[in-house]
Amino acid sequence: GAGVSQTPSNKVTEKGKYVELRCDPISGHTALYWYRQSLGQGPEFLIYFQGTGAADDSGLPNDRFFAVRPEGSVSTLKIQRTERGDSAVYLCASSATGGGYNEQFFGPGTRLTVL
Amino acid sequence: AQRVTQPEKLLSVFKGAPVELKCNYSYSGSPELFWYVQYSRQRLQLLLRHISRESIKGFTADLNKGETSFHLKKPFAQEEDSAMYYCALLGGYNKLIFGAGTRLAVHP
């Protein structure tokens, strides 16, 4: 079966622009996570969805970052007024449920470059 | 504070040598710890978790609560073990808290 997919694989934008990053989780997975990985660092948690709702958005760095999952499947991470410091690989992961630990399966990531 | 520390950015060994990738954590409570691996041009994937007490691809990791460590070990490294290794701690809402990672390079 298909794993987690993310589009685009690469995104280059200019400072101040708006970007959307998409995540397609494994079919049937109710839990979805976004992480951000800066160069030389491990992934850093951004937000967790259980179904359609954001159960934990404590990792979003500021109000320029927003994520949605309107139908409990595909999720979109939205970044407004991008800054050079937003350049990173954005990873999405999904797991079967959010209760108790279920293995998180990661997507290939979207590499965002802000010029 | 919940934190994972991997003190080595790079570990370079020869094939057949023992390997130990260090991981220390900070967590109040009973921790759940994992090792994730990322091979070249592949996505991040789970290698093992302490609760399973399993050996995967010859790797083992023992949780030492006294030393707050979860080091990853393999007695005889293989070239195909070359990869980035991340230690991770399970935080609230099942979010993973990762260390900065260690690159393992196994030379022939």
Image: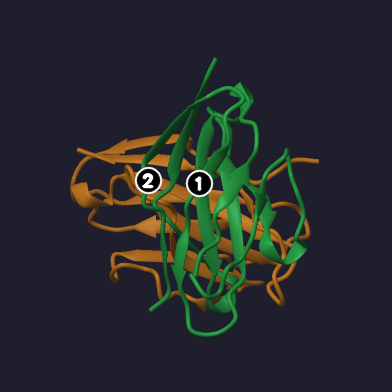
Which color mode does the image show? by chain
Q: Amino acid at mark 1?
A: Leu
One can see residue B5 in this view: yes
Q: Looking at the image, which residue is at 36% across and 52% down?
A: B7
Badge 2 local density, few (<14 within 10 Å), some, or many (20+)? some
Q: Looking at the image, which residue is at 70% across and 43% down?
A: A3
Residue B64 picture location, percent across and down? 57, 68
Subunit of mark 1?
A: B
Element on which disc 1 rests: strand
* Lateral position of residue A99 relative to residue A14, left or right: right
Which chain gets the green colouring? Answer: B
* Lateral position of residue B103 relative to residue B49, left or right: left
Q: Nearer the viewer, residue A70 or A98?
A: A98
Q: Residue B79 sits in which quadrant?
A: top right
User: Does B90 appear above or below B41?
Assistant: below
Q: Quadrant of the C terminus of chain A?
A: top left
User: Does A59 appear above or below A95?
Assistant: below
Q: CA distance from mark 2 to mark 1?
A: 8 Å
What label sits on residue B58 in the rendered view? none
Q: Looking at the image, which residue is at 55% across and 60% down?
A: B70
Subunit of mark 2?
A: B
The residue under label 1 is B21
User: Does A91 appear above or below A49?
Assistant: above
Residue B75 picture location, percent across and down? 65, 38
The residue under label 2 is B8
User: Is disc 2 in contact with disc 1, using a CB cutoff of under 8 Å?
Assistant: yes
According to the rendering, which colour does chain A have?
Answer: orange
Q: Amino acid at mark 2?
A: Glu
Q: Quadrant of the N terminus of chain A?
A: top right
Badge 1 local density, few (<14 within 10 Å), some, or many (20+)? many
Q: Nearer the viewer, residue A104 or A32?
A: A104
Q: Earlier in the sequence, mark 2 or mark 1?
A: 2
